[in-house]
Image (cartoon, rainbow, N blue to C red):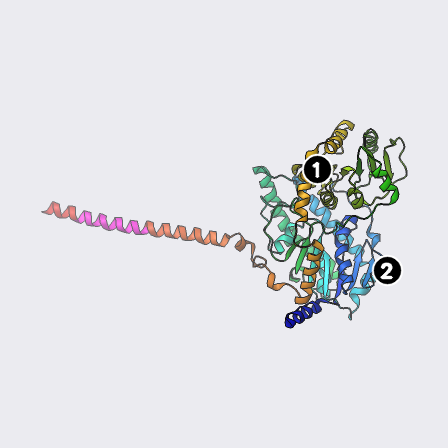
Amino acid sequence: MLANVLLVISVCGLASGARILGVFDFPSYSHHVVYAPLYQELSKRGHDVVVITPNPLRDPTLTNLTEIDVSYLYKPVPIITKVQLSRYMHFVGTLYHYSVHLFEELMRNNEVKKLIEDPKEHFDLVIIEDAQPLLYAFGKRFNAPMVGILSVETSMSTHAALGNPIHPALYTDFVMDYSDRPSIWSKIQYTINTVCFKVLDGIISPHIANKIIRKYFGSHMPSLTEYGHLSILLVSVNPFFSPNRPLTPQTIPIPFIHVQDPKPLPSDLQELLDNSPQGAVYFSLGSNVKSASLPVALQNTIIETLSELPYTVLWKWEAENIPRLGRNVVTRKWFPQQDILAHPNIKVFIFQGGLQSSEESIMRGKPMVGLPFISEQHRNVKIIQKLGIALGLDPMSMTKESLKHAIVEIAENKKYRAKIQQLKAIAEDQPMSSLDKAVFWTEYVIRHNGTEHLKSPAVDMPMYEYLLLDVIVVSFLLLILSAFLIYYLMKCIYQKLLSLYIKYVNKMKIS
């Protein structure tokens, strides 16, 4: 017994006090809320954590956490609207160019430059936001194993790099249009997009990335193709929004990692919601889409609709007070969203279709009205509507009548709340929390200096072997050879029999 205890202590000690670097460059609060719980917890567990982030916590109680503030990366983001399949590669190209821009802005930071130029600097682990290949350079610079983390489903290239299947008819990329039963034409388009993405990722992207990496890390840096792979990927996917894909041991789903236990509301909000006998509606378009920046005509449609509702409405509005609002509508620049959704009088959550907001709504058991604007939001809203926990509307074409009907339908029809309670029960029925899972596997990588022993054999297998093209070609050649041999044998037998027959006939003629 004592030996087992000592063994556990010694194994845990291998991961204690490690020096960890986190690199997160995408300026989006919805991304940050997924990453922060992990490095917060690692710092609390005694690790020395240095984080490059556009969303610093500035928490003086986290004495083991050093933050390099790159919040200047918050500049206008290229708005990527609904992704049509015909424009998929344009979307990927736009996102890639934006990622390059972010990386170059990041590398101009004096603290970042000092970090990578210090020959004595050392890290036992590098955690990167796995949204672009350029950040892999940090792992190579410090000769440390890498953990990737992402707040949404990851790309086809990362799945392929970890040995996960990327079958285009089963697992479309998360920014592609959603269909649970794609037509033959959609499957063809998905396949073309997959092939194009592989070409971009395997040929074009590394060539560009190598030049950029060597510009900031030095000409001695090897080619990106020689960097190896992530030790593990922590990916924020849940069983409702992503198809059930067989995953290698290096791919760790961390659904709902950012959802916390409800905290008490400020007294004014608590009183307001408590005194809403008809119920309340919470309306927020998240951190990337601003209600105050919507077209005036759309704003007017929303204002008129909300003002006519029989419910109290809390609306996240980023500007000053709005004229012509009904007395039932309260606007503020910020609301404690998770805590508001936990209030029993909230009947409907009107939102933009973001994954993290969807997860919060599921865990609070609140059905939704989705108004998607950018990126994967359209796909998400289609999914939650298919799940029976929401109604979706096109914000650019909806009318006051259609929006009001959707809100009242969700608020008053009990089937939506019943369905989301079922999903909530599934989401909560897990052997351990996603945060505990993420911390365990992160420290696992530190203890074993990587996860080479967990790597799938598919990772190093050429595509022609993975698709069994060599088997098909050899089988086809053997089939042709067998057919030729059978033909040749039958021909020989035929000629021999013919010869014997001729001899027999001639002999009969002579006799």
50 vs 189: above or below: below
Question: Magenta region, mostly helix, strand or loop?
Answer: helix
User: Which secondary structure, mark 2?
Assistant: loop
Say what amino acid the circle numbered 1 marks.
Answer: Arg
Q: Position of residue 319 (x, y in %)?
A: 88, 40
How many residues crowd mark 2 within 10 Å: few (<14), some (14–19), many (20+)? few
Query: Residues at badges 2 and 1 in contact (C-beta under 8 Å)?
Result: no
The foreground one among 240 and 429 is 429
The foreground one among 23 and 384 is 384
The span picked out in magenta is 488-503
Return the disc, 2 or 1, that comes first in the chain's sequence: 2
Q: Quadrant of the N terminus?
A: bottom right
Q: Is residue 276 left or right of residue 422?
A: right
Q: Disc 2 designates what residue?
A: 60
Q: Position of residue 485 (x, y in %)?
A: 34, 52
How many residues crowd mark 1 within 10 Å: few (<14), some (14–19), many (20+)? many
Q: Position of residue 2 (x, y in %)?
A: 65, 72
CA distance separating discs 2 and 1: 41 Å
Which label number is shown at residue 417?
1
- 74 magenta-colored: no
User: Which secondary structure, mark 1?
Assistant: helix
Q: Could you say which quadrant of the image residue 361 lies in?
A: top right
- 499 magenta-colored: yes
The foreground one among 281 and 127 is 281
Foreground mark, 2 or 1? 1
Q: Residue furthest left?
A: 511
